Image (tube, rainbow, N blue to C red):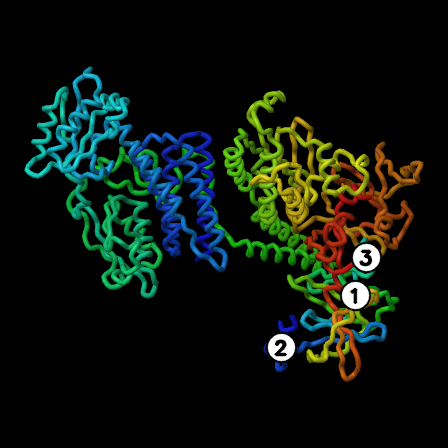
């Protein structure tokens, strides 16, 4: 799965590129292959009768894209948007785009597959639900999020 | 290339089905139809060979051959059903093959079984023709049309009147001359076993084709015949085999193909096929181009020699010139001497317009009818309207139309962006406004035109059902009429594509479950023995309504409920379900009331798929049924999916668009109009009628700009036959919007059910949500 987009780069096929961002002080990562673009916060149109964590829809060059608040998704209190608030636009198979609102975007790091370990099987921990694997970097331990679950599961 | 082939062949096969269906219901073949089928098969054969699809080409060839016999010999067809079966199966096989071709790992299917069946039937037709003998025209040289395997002299023997048992007398003749002939064949052939042939012999005479044995001459054989008892006369009707087309009469052309065009032999075949369409007696060299690919080389080196006879050689030459890949040609020889053709022309071209193909001067053996018309030629005016397939049409890739529609949508948005640009606020722009109005007018015309290009009548989708009904009629042994109403109603192409499957499922359901199993059941119920399925379509307020109705046994709600309970799909106590709810349960996944799974239905996926497919295109399905009287499925689909005239209203920070065709009026409410019932539910009284009041901010949990009914605006909207008043802050204006569907993520949360049809981007880049009044009224 990780091999898809990285074949012709100068690192091994098992390595993955990860985009890191912060939510409420914690650093999370997502695989870059899902990331289409990163934009600043925009006017969000509210859509009634949908779960709270979906904030509404935005217009990205003529496409109507729903946006999700990661804070709300994790059950953390939302803060007012500022100039560092970003929307990371993810694209899934079949071209479906979804934006996720994060506090700030950090950097992209190539992660060696040796540095990745699976999550402990502990479904009773709430936020574990969205975590795909744990990355052990020199700068510390980071959580890698499962984009599909982050967006799709209710 | 492959696309073109697939498209063409599919269209041809559909036409074929239509012709077959028409002739089957009239239970007779007209000359026009036979020609049409023949031509269709001929074209498929040619283009399949061109594509290297040997199996397709051979199958088409077999059918073509069969119709050749039908056309030339007019045999009496004893078993129409077999004939139709053969042709329908062939058409099905070809359709399936076309589907397969479009897949990557295509390998040709073996059609030899079907081909053998067709050939067998064709042989029967041929012999039947002999048995049935021929009218005066049988006087033509037997060696040509009937093509007996024996070549030789043919004679017609007649017997003395009232001699009785002509068949046995004929047998006697045969026995007599058997010894002095090396080969012998006769018509009718079953004189020994079939005493009916006596009548035929009396009427048409007894035809014998023979080759004299060594040491005998034609005359000695004829004398022997004349010596037989009761023989009245013996006339020679033909001598020897018809000579091959005399070179002196025909034009010979040497054709060269473009360098490196590949498959010269098949290209040559294509040319031959085209030339055949416009003239008769075509011969060519090398002769085995169809089967022998080595001939390609020969053609490259020596050219391809084509001989044809026509009284308009120039036109034929033009056909050759226009054929694909032909580089050049030279005329080697022209017909010599004056032609006897013109005299024959008048009586050989009964129906065709003079412009259609050149009716070739008839060489003696040909049957008195023109071979074909050249295909694009105008139809004779008297032709039945059902042949509407040939109009001045072009086929366009649907993707291009989609792009065009998208572009028009963008133009509509951009126009709004320009004309209501914030930079223009407060300026006096008389000329600008004038031009803007003109632009808007043109844009809306452009949009109408693009939409109308995409509109397709439902008749195509409907007529596909004839085929299904026909097949099921045979298989299930039920007699059913399929009736169309309003099939000329048009819907968007993208809608129609999604409609085929649901329609098919519903028609199958009606055939299988709806119509009673036996005619007695129907008669006992006081209904005509013949069942009836009606497909009807009509326009109603921006929607197309399609109804599939049968007059069968209807749905038994108690049975449905019991079944639903058994399958565990009930969500509340059984007694709480209304009849309508129960009926609609048949569209839930995993539901099927038929005890037995048949080939056609009963897997419990059908109606579920129907509902899903219809909902995908923004439509709804509902069921209406009366036990013992029949069932109707009612499909409502939007006329078009993409551009809507809408009224924008604001509610707090949100902007909603209400489709104009759902709005009856909008007004400021006055205190005396407001009525409250005992539950505190608000209603608005308009001209003596009360309508429920729906506050948009309330149903959508929004922060309103105003809660004061008299400050905001009330919109009387209509949907699903019911009306309600929607309350919003204010009207913003009317605008055309391009509907963009919600992303799948939002669709998961049933936004459609909550009255949101989609969204759209406004001129300033903001997003508006398009409301679906039907769902709002039924949901809130």
Crowd tier of the residue under label 1, counting other residues whose Cα lies within 10 Å: few below 14, some 14–19, many 20 or above: some
Q: Is residue B738 visible?
A: yes
To the question of a shared chain for discs 1 and 3, the answer is: yes
Residue located at (60% from left, 49% from top): B494
Crowd tier of the residue under label 3, counting other residues whose Cα lies within 10 Å: few below 14, some 14–19, many 20 or above: some
- Across and down, in percent, residue A46 comes to 80, 58
Q: CA distance from mark 3 to mark 2?
A: 38 Å
Specify whether B378 is left or right of B336. right
Label 2 secondary element? loop
Q: CA distance from mark 1 to mark 2?
A: 27 Å
The part of the image, by quadrant, that contains residue B673 is top right
Which is more foreground, mark 1 or mark 3? 1
**Which numbered disc flags the more N-terminal residue, 1 or 2?**
2
Whether residue B311 is situated above or below residue B231 in the rendered picture: below
Q: Which residue corresponds to mark 2?
A: A13
**Which numbered disc flags the more N-terminal residue, 3 or 2?**
2
Q: CA distance from mark 1 to mark 3?
A: 18 Å
Identify the image quadrant of the C terminus of chain B.
top right
Residue located at (90% from left, 45% from top): B710
Looking at the image, which is closer to me, A29 or B137?
Answer: A29
Which is more foreground, mark 3 or mark 2? 2
Residue A51: mark: 3
Looking at the image, which is closer to me, B206 or B142?
Answer: B206
Residue located at (78% from left, 77% from top): A142
The part of the image, by quadrant, that contains residue A66 is bottom right
Label 1 secondary element? helix
Q: Which residue corresponds to mark 1?
A: A129
Looking at the image, which is closer to me, B158 or B711?
Answer: B158
To the question of a shared chain for discs 3 and 2, the answer is: yes
Specify whether B171 is left or right of B293. left
């Amino acid at each position: 799965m990780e091999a898809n987009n990285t074949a012709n780069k100068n690192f091994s096929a098992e390595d993955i590129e990860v985009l890191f961002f912060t939510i409420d002080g914690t650093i999370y990562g997502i695989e870059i292959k899902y990331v289409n673009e990163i934009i600043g916060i925009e006017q969000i149109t509210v859509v009634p009768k949908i779960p709270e964590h979906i904030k509404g829809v935005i217009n990205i060059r003529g496409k109507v894209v729903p946006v999700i608040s990661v804070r709300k998704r994790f059950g953390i209190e939302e803060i007012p948007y500022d100039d560092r608030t970003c929307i990371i636009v993810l694209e899934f198979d079949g071209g479906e785009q979804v934006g996720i609102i994060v506090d700030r975007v950090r950097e992209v790091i190539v992660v060696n597959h040796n540095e990745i370990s699976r999550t402990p099987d502990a479904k009773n921990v709430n936020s574990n639900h969205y975590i795909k694997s744990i990355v052990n970097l020199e700068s510390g331990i980071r959580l890698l999020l499962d984009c599909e679950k982050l967006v799709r599961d209710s | 290339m492959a696309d073109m082939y697939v498209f063409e062949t599919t269209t041809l096969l559909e036409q074929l089905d239509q012709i077959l269906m028409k002739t089957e219901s009239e239970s007779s073949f007209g000359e026009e139809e036979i020609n049409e089928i023949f031509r269709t098969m001929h074209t498929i054969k040619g283009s399949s060979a061109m594509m290297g699809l040997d199996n397709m080409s051979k199958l088409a060839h077999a059918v073509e051959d069969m119709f050749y016999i039908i056309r030339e010999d007019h045999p009496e067809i004893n078993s129409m059903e077999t004939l139709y079966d053969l042709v329908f199966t062939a058409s099905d096989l070809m359709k399936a093959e076309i589907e397969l071709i479009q897949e990557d790992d295509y390998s040709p299917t073996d059609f030899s079984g079907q081909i053998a069946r067709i050939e067998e039937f064709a042989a029967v037709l041929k012999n039947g023709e002999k048995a049935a003998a021929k009218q005066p025209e049988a006087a033509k040289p037997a060696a040509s049309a009937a093509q007996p395997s024996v070549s030789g002299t043919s004679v017609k023997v007649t017997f003395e009147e009232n001699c009785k048992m002509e068949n046995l007398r004929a047998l006697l003749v045969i026995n007599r001359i058997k010894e002095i002939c090396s080969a012998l064949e006769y018509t009718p052939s079953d004189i020994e076993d079939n005493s009916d042939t006596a009548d035929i012999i009396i009427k048409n005479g007894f035809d014998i084709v023979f080759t004299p044995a060594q040491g005998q001459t034609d005359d000695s054989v004829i004398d022997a015949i004349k010596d037989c008892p009761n023989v009245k006369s013996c006339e020679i009707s033909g001598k020897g085999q018809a000579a091959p087309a005399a070179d002196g009469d025909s034009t010979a052309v040497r054709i060269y193909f473009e360098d490196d065009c590949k498959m010269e032999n098949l290209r040559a075949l294509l040319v031959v096929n085209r030339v055949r369409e416009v003239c008769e007696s075509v011969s060519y060299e090398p002769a085995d181009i169809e089967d022998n690919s080595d001939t390609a080389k020969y053609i490259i080196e020596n050219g391809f020699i084509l001989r044809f006879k026509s009284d308009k050689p120039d036109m034929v030459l033009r056909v050759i010139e226009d054929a694909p890949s032909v580089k050049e040609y030279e005329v080697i020889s022209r017909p010599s001497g004056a032609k006897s053709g013109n005299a024959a022309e008048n009586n050989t071209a009964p129906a065709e317009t003079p412009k259609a193909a050149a009716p070739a001067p008839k060489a003696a053996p040909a049957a008195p009818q023109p071979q074909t018309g050249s295909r694009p030629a105008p139809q004779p005016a008297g032709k039945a309207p059902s042949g509407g397939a040939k109009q001045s049409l072009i086929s366009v890739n649907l993707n291009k139309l989609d792009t065009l529609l998208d572009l028009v949508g963008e133009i509509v948005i951009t126009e709004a962006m320009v004309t209501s640009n914030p930079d223009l606020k407060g300026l006096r722009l008389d000329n600008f406004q004038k031009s803007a109005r003109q632009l808007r007018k043109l844009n809306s015309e452009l949009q109408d035109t693009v939409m109308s290009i995409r509109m397709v009548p439902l008749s195509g989708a409907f007529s596909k059902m004839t085929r299904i009904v026909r097949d099921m009629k045979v298989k299930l042994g039920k007699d059913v009429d399929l009736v169309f109403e309003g099939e000329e109603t048009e819907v968007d192409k993208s809608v129609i594509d999604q409609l085929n499957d649901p329609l098919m499922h519903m028609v199958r359901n009606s055939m299988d479950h709806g119509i009673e199993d036996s005619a007695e059941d129907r008669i006992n119920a006081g209904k005509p023995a013949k069942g009836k399925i009606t497909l009807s379509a009509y326009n109603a307020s921006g929607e197309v309504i399609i109804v599939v109705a049968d007059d069968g046994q209807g749905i038994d709600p108690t049975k449905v409920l019991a079944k639903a309970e058994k399958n565990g799909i009930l969500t509340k106590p059984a007694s709480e379900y209304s009849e309508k709810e129960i009926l609609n349960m048949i569209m839930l996944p995993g539901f099927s009331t038929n005890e037995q799974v048949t080939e056609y239905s009963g897997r419990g996926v059908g109606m579920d798929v129907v509902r899903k497919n219809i909902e995908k295109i923004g439509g709804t399905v509902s069921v209406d049924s009366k036990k013992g009287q029949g069932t109707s499925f009612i499909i409502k689909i939007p006329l078009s999916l993409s551009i809507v005239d809408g009224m924008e209203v604001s509610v707090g920070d949100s902007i909603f668009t209400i489709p104009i065709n759902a709005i009856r009026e909008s007004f400021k409410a006055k205190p005396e109009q407001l009525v409250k019932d005992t539950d505190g539910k608000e209603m608005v009284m308009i001209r003596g009628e009360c309508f429920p009041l729906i506050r948009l901010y309330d149903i959508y949990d929004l922060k309103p700009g105003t809660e004061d009914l008299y400050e905001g605006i009330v919109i009387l909207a209509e949907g699903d036959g019911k009306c309600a008043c929607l309350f919003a802050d204010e009207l913003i204006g009317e605008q055309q919007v391009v509907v963009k569907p919600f992303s799948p993520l939002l669709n998961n949360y049933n936004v459609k059910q909550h009255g949101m049809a989609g969204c759209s981007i406004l001129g300033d880049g903001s997003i508006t949500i398009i409301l679906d009044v039907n769902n709002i009224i039924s949901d809130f």
